[in-house]
Amino acid sequence: MSTPYRKSTKLPEGSTKRFPLLPRLISTSLGAGFLPVAPGTWGALVGIILWLPLYLWASPAACVWVTIAASVVFCIVGVWASSEAEKYWGQDPVVACIDETVGQWIALIPVAGVALCPWWEIVVAFALFRFFDIFKPLGIRVTERLPRGYGMMADDVVAGIYSAIIILCINYLFVFPAHEIA
């Protein structure tokens, strides 16, 4: 499959009129997928925008658990909405970007667990997630072969997990070294 930037954003004529509103809103991350350039990037940014108030106002533990819960719930709902999107817009439509939103939330889980995480970790989590999502190294591309919405969601979930692992390593080695924690 080609990268999201090479896919056409042109949808079949009248398809948005026929596509029911709820799965359309979910699959496009509240419409972000309709933005003209790089809908996957917009989907990931929606994830950050929706997550930031939680991070700023909740305790680290609450932020982690709510982020995990939202990732699981929207992964399940996203499979359904993405499967519906494929019925109207064809296989893996570029405007369906709930997978990027969920993948970004997964990438932010290690950031969520730190009360005063450096702001740049959010940027790094975003950059890492988009890198893994676009280039699909380390077996990520294989997950796209799953049927319907499962394949659409799986590659971004794996990209989010890889990004989260790297953020955890950054925190362990550089931000909060073991000698400072003890």
Image (cartoon, helix red, strand yellow):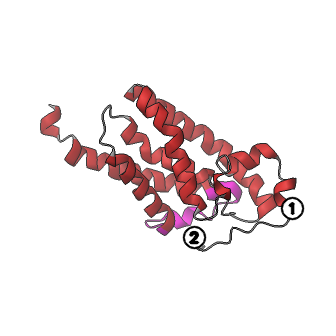
Image quadrant for the C terminus? Answer: top left
Please, is residue 133 above or below residue 48 in the view?
Answer: below
In this view of the protein, can residue 139 be seen by the observer?
A: yes
Vertical side of 47 occupied by 56: above or below:
above
| Residue 64 appearing in the image | no
User: Residue 5: horizontal and vertical position, in percent?
Assistant: 57, 70
Q: Residue 137 carries which label?
A: none
Residue 64: image x %, image y %? 43, 33
**With 110 as the anchor, is 80 left or right in this view?**
right
Residue 122 lies, with reference to residue 40, above or below; the image says above
**Left or right of residue 111: residue 66:** right
Q: Is mark 1 on a helix, strand or loop?
A: loop
Q: What is the number of the mark on residue 14?
A: 1
Q: In which quarter of the image is residue 60?
A: top left
- Which of the 4 quarters of the picture holds residue 115? top left
- Which quarter of the figure is the N terminus placed in? bottom right
Magenta residues span 135-152
Taking 173 as reference, is 87 above or below it? below
> What residue is disc 2 on?
5
From the top left corner, tell me how far across and down residue 108 is, in percent: 43, 44
Disc 2 to disc 1: CB gap under 8 Å: no
The residue type indicated by label 2 comes to: Tyr
> Which residue is rendered at x = 50% and y = 31% of the image?
66
In magenta stretch: residue 145: yes
Percent of width and height locating residue 95: 67, 59
Q: How crowded is mark 1: few (under 14 residues within 10 Å), some or many (20 or more)?
A: few
